Image (tube, rainbow, N blue to C red):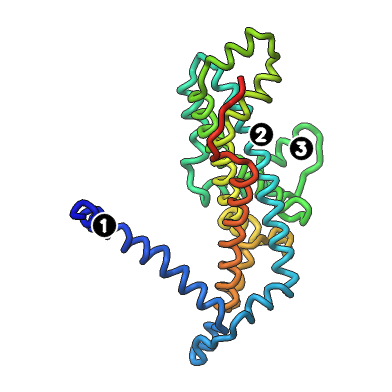
Amino acid sequence: MEDRRTKWIMLLPALIVFAALGVYPTIEALYTSLTRYNLTDPAAGKVFIGLGNYLHLVKDVRFWMALARAVEFVAVSVSISFVLGLMIALILQKTKWFQGFFRIVFLVPMVIAPTISTLNFKFMYNYNLGIINKLLQAIGLDKIDFLGNPSLALWSAVAVDVWQWTPLVILVLLSGLEALPREPFEAALIDGASGWQVFRYMTLPLLNRFIVVVLIIRAMDALKVYETIQLMTAGGPGNASETLNTYLATVGFQWFDIGYASALGIFALYFTTFLAMILVKYTGAFKSKQVKA
């Protein structure tokens, strides 16, 4: 009994911090999402309107278009960074020379602040002065308006996201590859399995938990992307690169409609949680199982 009380006393500071920084803001945002609260009319305060903001959200065409772009951003960015990261991790696992050097090199994009990397890429994309268009002209191709073309603006931001966060995929998957037992692989090769069969039926299943973890981290990170798009295109041209978070920021910080912005934030929270649950449930990554050699 005394031990139990001591454990709770030791946990108390952490629980207080969690309640203050995690639980309270969420409850406050949930309540605000059920009110009409606009900072341009402070005298009105928060007026409880029930599910009014959520009904407005259902009918809001701009919201659905922003959500669709956010899903596109997540699907493309996570897919490319996962494939690239897995390929590089497999190569690094086999690399015997300068392995430590390459690991440090691949860490560089992650340690650069997103704001700095985004501004660098924005300058590189510049139609008249950017190095990418200079290179295109040097090989006889036409210049491309990466940020002014509605068809390219979102994908230009995706490229920045892939460049910055693929190293995270490499590190997680490389750690997983190096933790795998060697005996099943050696036995399979002795039995005559091809390299593809070993990869398909042994490496991927054994690496499943690492894959799910990195996909969840990348999906959540890509879904809440804000700085990259805001600094690079500000959601433009028009609304061509506007995603859920940039639309939320527009509603909250330009229109000052805090009630509706809170509803968008609560939706984003549950949408992210739903995606994570889908990944965990349907991949079965965290269920105990035996691997067939």
Of the 4 image quadrants, the one containing the C terminus is top right
Give the camera-side residue of 73 and 265: 265
Circle 3 Cα neighbour tier, 10 Å, few/some/many (<14 / 14–19 / ≥20)? few
Residue at (52, 91) in percent of width and height: 44
Q: Mark 2 to mark 3: distance in Å? A: 30 Å
Q: Nearer the viewer, mark 1 or mark 3?
A: 1
Helix, strand or loop at mark 1 = helix
Q: Which residue is identified by label 3?
A: 137
The residue furthest front is 1
Marks 2 & 3, CB-CB < 8 Å contact? no
Q: Which residue is identified by label 1?
A: 8
Marks 2 & 1, CB-CB < 8 Å contact? no
Tag shown at residue 65:
none
- First reached walking from the N terminus: tag 1 or tag 3: 1
Helix, strand or loop at mark 2 = helix
Circle 1 Cα neighbour tier, 10 Å, few/some/many (<14 / 14–19 / ≥20)? few
Residue 10 position (above or below residue 43): above
Q: What amino acid type should be assigned to the residue bearing mark 2?
A: Val
Q: Say if residue 266 shows up in the picture.
A: yes
Residue 267 position (above or below residue 168): below
Circle 2 Cα neighbour tier, 10 Å, few/some/many (<14 / 14–19 / ≥20)? some
Q: Which residue is identified by label 2?
A: 83
Give the camera-side residue of 87 and 52: 52
Residue 32 position (above or below residue 219): below
- First reached walking from the N terminus: tag 2 or tag 3: 2
Residue at (59, 46) in percent of width and height: 280
Residue at (62, 53) in percent of width and height: 275
Q: What amino acid type should be assigned to the residue bearing mark 1?
A: Trp
Q: What amino acid type should be assigned to the residue bearing mark 3?
A: Gln
Of the 4 image quadrants, the one containing the N terminus is bottom left
